[in-house]
Amino acid sequence: MASYEIVGGKKLNGIVNPQGAKNEALEVICATLLTSESVEICNIPEISDILNLIALLQEIGVDIKHPSKGKWIFKAENINLEYLKSEAFCVKSAKLRGAVMIIGPLLSRFGYAYMPKPGGDKIGRRHLDTHFIGLKKLGAEFQFDNNSSSYTILGNNLKGTYILLEEASVTGTANVVMAAVMAKGETTLFNAACEPYICQLCTMLNNMGANITGVGSNLLHIKGVDKLHSTSHTCLPDMIEIGSFIGLAAMTGSEITIKNVCHQHLGIIPSAFKKLGIKLETINDDIYIPAQDHYQIESYIDGSILTIADAPWPGLTPDLLSVLLVVATQARGSVLIHQKMFESRLFFVDSLIDMGAQIILCDPHRATVIGNDHKFSLKPTVMASPDIRAGVALLIAALSANGRSIIHNIEQIDRGYENFDQRLRDLGADIKRVL
């Protein structure tokens, strides 16, 4: 198990280029299973979750080439469906939650899929009912084996239908869309997630010959086609990493420019940081964060304490609440952070409290943060990363703390952030990876 050793309390400075979007890459890589022709995808982040998915597809039989950094070519011409029931597949796919999105493409093209219960972050219950109910409405049959905790899914004759998703699940929407693109007839998908990454997936599928309308809204119409063909696709920059760098600049009082952010796809992320008093400037397609010694949390018009909460897009992504919470610990004022989706995601605040942050964990979903206005820095400590986003939030806290901190279990951070320690060193951070 690797760790980060950080000497914090230093101001950083420089320019960063955000990596490709992890969540989009997981979706579009799975979509390459829908055709036997070559699909080229650029700006793929080479992080552990993505590399594990690529390795999994390779073992299923996808021919994969890697001509240059971030550029991969997939050709799913000779798929070995028998491999899906192998012990090796079960072990590897169970560790990667994104692997659940191979179900839709496999059902659509082959009428068969097999999947052990997927893993991923330990941030609370993450039911797959949205996926399964949508796929069942298309005609899929599910068989669950209690002994192996695995699903066998059959669907040789998928038919378009009306589907109202129980929740606007991003991965659930992606799975149902990929299953429906070659189903017979038309599928109407209501309450679909409409994050930019779903829009990117639908655009890529349309470029492959799919017929999807309503892209960008929560009402999709999908007319089934007989076959999909090759295409080339480029992933967006990762909005979560962009938000993480904004939070890092604020906490450390640093001057940082984030290049080529595709501002039109960031939604309300910049305004969420502005509510905490963070100054941001948009210069062309870059975000410039000037050094700030103090930042003031806004309050509501009647003077009551601000609440920042996650919500389905175009609301605030839950993946950034951990970073926003950490940033608030050094603000002037108070804020209530309301994490609605996952009941275990705020438990990392115990480590921040140990560092001297003033936080009241009201319940598993809500935390009140009383900012100390940089009157004293957080104390260095030894801690462990419980999941990707909390791990980066703790890393940001450690970089702001005067002294030496250790963060264990940084493999969690590796799952979502590419070569993060080196990129931080390029900004002037004192951080090294130790075994």
Image: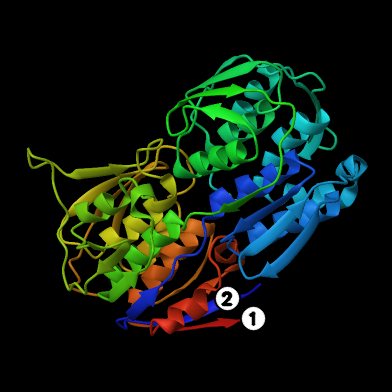
Query: Which color scheme did the rendering employ for the protein?
Result: rainbow
Residue ID at (65%, 58%)? 50
Residue ID at (86%, 44%)? 79
Instruction: Count residues near mark 1 (Cα–Cα under 10 Å), then give few for <14, some for 14-19, many for 20+.
Output: few
Residue 19 in view in this figure: yes
Q: Earlier in the sequence, mark 1 or mark 2?
A: 2
Say above or below: 159 vs 311: above
Left or right of residue 218, residue 35 in this image = right
Residue with the most extreme left position: 302
Viewer-nearest residue: 123 or 96: 96
Left or right of residue 258, residue 201 in this image = right
Question: Please, what secondary structure does the residue beneath circle 1 have?
Answer: loop
Q: Are the residues tagged 1 and 2 within 8 Å (C-beta)?
A: yes
In the rendered image, residue 359, in percent from the top left (x then y), is placed at: 30, 55
Residue 435: which disc? 1
Q: Quadrant of the C terminus?
A: bottom right
